[in-house]
Image (spheres, coloured by chain):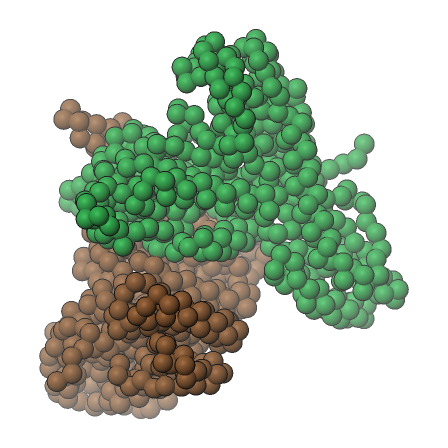
Chain colours: A green, B brown
Amino acid sequence: MEKNAISPSRAENYPEWYQEVIKAGDLAENAPVRGCMVIKPWGYALWENMQAALDAKFKATGHVNAYFPLLIPLSFMAKEAEHVDGFAKECAVVTHHRLKANDKGELRPDPASELEEPFIIRPTSETIIGHMYAKWVKSYRDLPILMNQWCNVMRWEMRTRMFLRTTEFLWQEGHTVHATAEEAVEETLKMLDVYADFAENHMAIPVIKGQKTPDERFPGAVDTYTIEAMMQDKKALQAGTSHFLGQNFAKASGIEFLSKEGKQETAWTTSWGVSTRMIGGLIMTHSDDDGLVLPPMLAPQQVLLIPIYKTDEERKQVLEYVNSLKKELEAQTYGGNAIRVKIDDRDMRGGEKAWQAIKQGIPLRAEIGPRDMAKGEVFVGRRDKGPKEKSSQARADFVKNAPSILAEIQATLFARAKAFRDSNIVRIDTLAEFEAHFSGSEEFGAKSGGFASVHWNEAAMGHEVLAKLKVTPRCIPLDSPNEEGKCIFTGKPSSKRVLFAKSY
Amino acid sequence: MEKNAISPSRAENYPEWYQEVIKAGDLAENAPVRGCMVIKPWGYALWENMQAALDAKFKATGHVNAYFPLLIPLSFMAKEAEHVDGFAKECAVVTHHRLKANDKGELRPDPASELEEPFIIRPTSETIIGHMYAKWVKSYRDLPILMNQWCNVMRWEMRTRMFLRTTEFLWQEGHTVHATAEEAVEETLKMLDVYADFAENHMAIPVIKGQKTPDERFPGAVDTYTIEAMMQDKKALQAGTSHFLGQNFAKASGIEFLSKEGKQETAWTTSWGVSTRMIGGLIMTHSDDDGLVLPPMLAPQQVLLIPIYKTDEERKQVLEYVNSLKKELEAQTYGGNAIRVKIDDRDMRGGEKAWQAIKQGIPLRAEIGPRDMAKGEVFVGRRDKGPKEKSSQARADFVKNAPSILAEIQATLFARAKAFRDSNIVRIDTLAEFEAHFSGSEEFGAKSGGFASVHWNEAAMGHEVLAKLKVTPRCIPLDSPNEEGKCIFTGKPSSKRVLFAKSY
């Protein structure tokens, strides 16, 4: 039996495999603050690449960035009733502004510094941004407002898991204001498309664009749209959401404008966000029993060059060869940027370096020793193939083909994930089948699980079978055709199928 | 008398002029959270350009980015005695993790959610990062650690002012660990050089690199180095600091390593940071009575094209001309990037647009109407010259010369600021002169103020005259020559001159 780098394997213990991939890939670590993580350089570089790609797309669609305060006055939260219901139970509350030593010399919040009105750390910023927008918007000429903010937010989650659900996380939140409902809906769907495009073409994660059912909406939204991805354990991951907020938040914040016709009107708003949670989705979509697998478009290093040598003389010659190879590769572009190449010249065994490259998900690695050098070759391994499937290639070919090989790896990862997902969506037409489908274990590879496409009616919200199975409606796919049917939970009429799944 | 865009002028009321420049430039606004600000798109775009330039310099000097938690356990703060003294009085404290409605239906922190150990919102991250480093560092092979973090921090300041001193601000904090004191000192000074290079060559702000006197050190540091700039009211602004922390924080956090010789040793650390405060410095260095003046290297838009037309037909033709001009300009590079050009095609008077461009500090603006078009010309204004000093230029010349004109503006801003600063540093050798020098009003242009270069001895720390005058030692300039003298406060011997000033 072949030995893999990650133990346990996905089949043995999927949740633990996930933690081990993060550890072996040196992506992040639990922090000494409940439910928080430290994002280590490799994980953060990945986030930086995600940010750069998303930010360019936001700007290309006319958005600008801004920054709003971390703290939100308690009274702001209370303005939108559903919103406060959704977030009040998981708010970090700031109550004092000074520390003081007590009798025993221990630091404590100074009672004299208690705030008249406590603040919460933003779990999301609709209320405070809405407050500012109400000041900025006077006339239809001020619309639309198309802003985005990159920041940290905090939700006091009880059960946390690195990247997927952490008390603090990094994200972007777009907040826009429009003169009409139509424009706001258009914006909501446009940003959903931006997210889907990013997920599929940069992260190589196939996603289903859909509308959330009412019970799964963002607190205070009229409509929530989502991109849903399938992980390798067949659970769903909500990877990004875009909300049409109607006039709910505009009314709560008083965002009004004088229309072209001279009428005072209430504006329409949207909000949309993706977060570091997407990194969890990336890990669970592509990684294997040898660790992380990174899509080339986002990999902080796309090619790792590993010099192999014994003597000092060999070292000198090989490093010279490898340095000039690096320059040639960097003169090539992939995805619009110079190829990102690194030389691993640490004082370590070559095999160890190759394994680290595998565990960190680097798309292409090339080992180069005196013999490869003499033949003008490099010894290449691809992360989308087995760790031992390596081949000698002429140096010039390797350089010339590097962009297309990276593109091929990117395409392979997407195609693989899409084939897996598509083969794990089933149409189910009876409640008994539905129960059987989701009653198996949650283990990786188990027959149970995957997405179920079923007829459903709003009256089924909160159905006991769903609670029992821990299955939720994920979305009504936007491309779902109209199809008359009967809700499998209530027997009531349904006109579209809805996707159900266990989820993160 | 000529009328200016900003009222009051610098001479009339400098502090209020500052607020008005921010408002007219649409950079930021006070937030509904005590002491916090909202950074508006124009201000944030400036910050993004600053981040991009600094981040590239950090990476070029071998640093990587990471992200550590926002919240710090109270017990961590207590580990380094001077550090806690320095920050305990201005900490936002998180004590609860849930809200609950009281009898009257008002939201309040839920008493049942009180945290066993409160958290503070990071005022700086030495303690929590040190905790992680202690886990990561085992042997000399793990050193150096060269990490940086871009994030928000919070210090509960009593008197706040946009950009210069806000409760929450954005910054970067570098934190490094080294095997020897020498290496750590070298890093500290290297990053000071990076800051000075950035300040002078990107922000066009001349700075004096120096060492802080003991009373002005970062709480817990062995040595603090600073870059000090002079504002137009002759006050000093500490624009960035780099700290040699010795073994103080390493001991407090337990950062130890096995040396090459097999000995367990305590590591040496540094930290260094610049923040959105630098934007305040930029405003006060270059802006004039017509508003913001941006150095071309950082301006979000470097050239603004203003189409002038009356009829729809003219509009169409002028826009076509302006669009092709934009493309030609964008094909030119300045500072290593394509020139950033924008067309202001809003439905507004051209004159109004030109004034807005001036108030927002855009380096170059060009008005183009049917007559300019017919002559193949553009009508150009430079922000480093008077608002009415405009000139017609042949279109081709304007395009060809744009990079060199931007470079000229950048150089002019720096030279102007440097000449102003250099003419406002005086050598003072008696306490009486010193008092007279700083006893005038603080108004812009007043004779009093500027930097005073005086002999000083540590025994003068906390001298009553300094407290009375609100003057502080800014730094011992690194290029200050050795010069025997007597401290003007105590008469004790001194071997170097120290710069004193009123400061932000």
Question: Does B184 sit above or below residue B67?
Answer: below
Q: Position of residue A139 (x, y in %)?
A: 23, 52
The N terminus of chain B, quarter of image = bottom left
Question: Does B139 sit above or below residue A373?
Answer: above
Question: Does B360 sit above or below residue A41?
Answer: below
Question: Does B305 sit above or below residue B146?
Answer: below
Horizontal relation, residue A468 to residue A443: left or right:
left
Horizontal relation, residue B177 to residue A361: left or right:
left
The C terminus of chain B, quarter of image = bottom left
Front residue of B24/A37: it is B24
Horizontal relation, residue B396 to residue B215: left or right:
right
Q: Which residue lies at the image location 49% right of the left edge and 27% below the top edge?
A: A476
Front residue of A148/A35: it is A148
Residue A373 in view of the camera: yes
Dividing the picture into quadrants, the one containing residue B45 is bottom left
| Picture mark count | 0
Q: Which residue lies at the image location 59% right of the left edge and 48% below the top edge?
A: A202
Q: Position of residue A82 (x, y in %)?
A: 29, 29
Q: Position of residue A413 (x, y in %)?
A: 67, 42
Q: Position of residue A269 (x, y in %)?
A: 32, 42
Front residue of B367/B94: it is B367
Residue B88 in view of the camera: no
Q: Which residue lies at the image location 21% right of the left edge and 27% below the top edge?
A: B101
Q: Which residue lies at the image location 18% right of the left edge and 57% below the top edge?
A: B158
